[in-house]
Image (tube, rainbow, N blue to C red):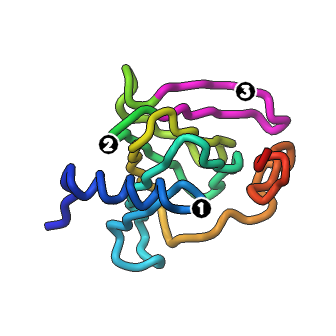
Amino acid sequence: MKQLTFNDLRKQSAQAANSPRLRAHHNFHPELSDPVQRLAIAMEPGTYVRPHRHPHTFELLTSLTGRFLVLNFDDLGNLTQRVVLGEDCKVLEMDAGTWHTVLSLDEGGVIFEVKHGRYQPVADQDAAPWAPPKTSRELQS
């Protein structure tokens, strides 16, 4: 049986805090080719997840610890929905093709994500053209 304990979450959060990206992943799926991707992602405030979409799959998120701001956008980059995950909302599911980003609001936050696999890096056409790339100098200032 696979488990994540409170101690595991604390360790994962410490790894994220010490990572240049301010994130750390713990995969529950055994292989990147698994048909269902299941993972805990520790995210510290200040990490940047470029708005993106997954045309082939829904994405289900729940907060294990902390709060996260989940933003959805239309094709032009206009905000269409804003949800704080980890307060009143405990679980949310976005439809396939939804432009979105996730921001960590609390230190030590860990989110759990489920989506169809196999793992595929976000393709260029699925990274929001109206948002800065994750290597942008504007993000570093």
Nearest to viewer (mark 1 / mark 2):
1
Mark 3 touches mark 2? (CB < 8 Å): no
Q: Residue at x 64, y 41 (%)?
A: 100
How many residues crowd around disc 1 within 10 Å: few (fewer than 14), some, or many (20 or more)? few
Residue 58 placed where, x, y %?
52, 49
Residue 21 placed where, x, y %?
59, 59
Q: Earlier in the sequence, mark 3 or mark 1?
A: 1
* Image vertical order of residue 67 relative to residue 124, above or below: above
Give the quadrant of the N terminus.
bottom left
**Residue range highlighted in magenta:** 68-84
Q: Secondary structure at mark 2?
A: strand
Residue type, numbered disc 1: Pro
* Residue occupied by mark 3: 79
* Image vertical order of residue 11 relative to residue 74, above or below: below
Q: Residue at x 74, y 56 (%)?
A: 134
Residue type, numbered disc 3: Leu
Residue 50 placed where, x, y %?
70, 49
Q: Is residue 70 magenta?
A: yes
Q: Residue furthest top?
A: 88
Q: Give the side of residue 117 with respect to residue 9, left or right.
A: right
* Residue occupied by mark 2: 64
Q: Residue at x 63, y 25 (%)?
A: 81
Residue type, numbered disc 2: Leu
Q: Earlier in the sequence, mark 3 or mark 2?
A: 2
How many residues crowd around disc 2 within 10 Å: few (fewer than 14), some, or many (20 or more)? some
* Residue occupied by mark 1: 20
Mark 1 touches mark 2? (CB < 8 Å): no
Q: Give the side of residue 136 with respect to residue 87, left or right.
A: right
- Residue 49 versus residue 19: which sits nearer the camera? 19
Q: Give the side of residue 111 with respect to residue 59, left or right.
A: left
Q: Residue furthest left?
A: 1
Q: Secondary structure at mark 3?
A: strand
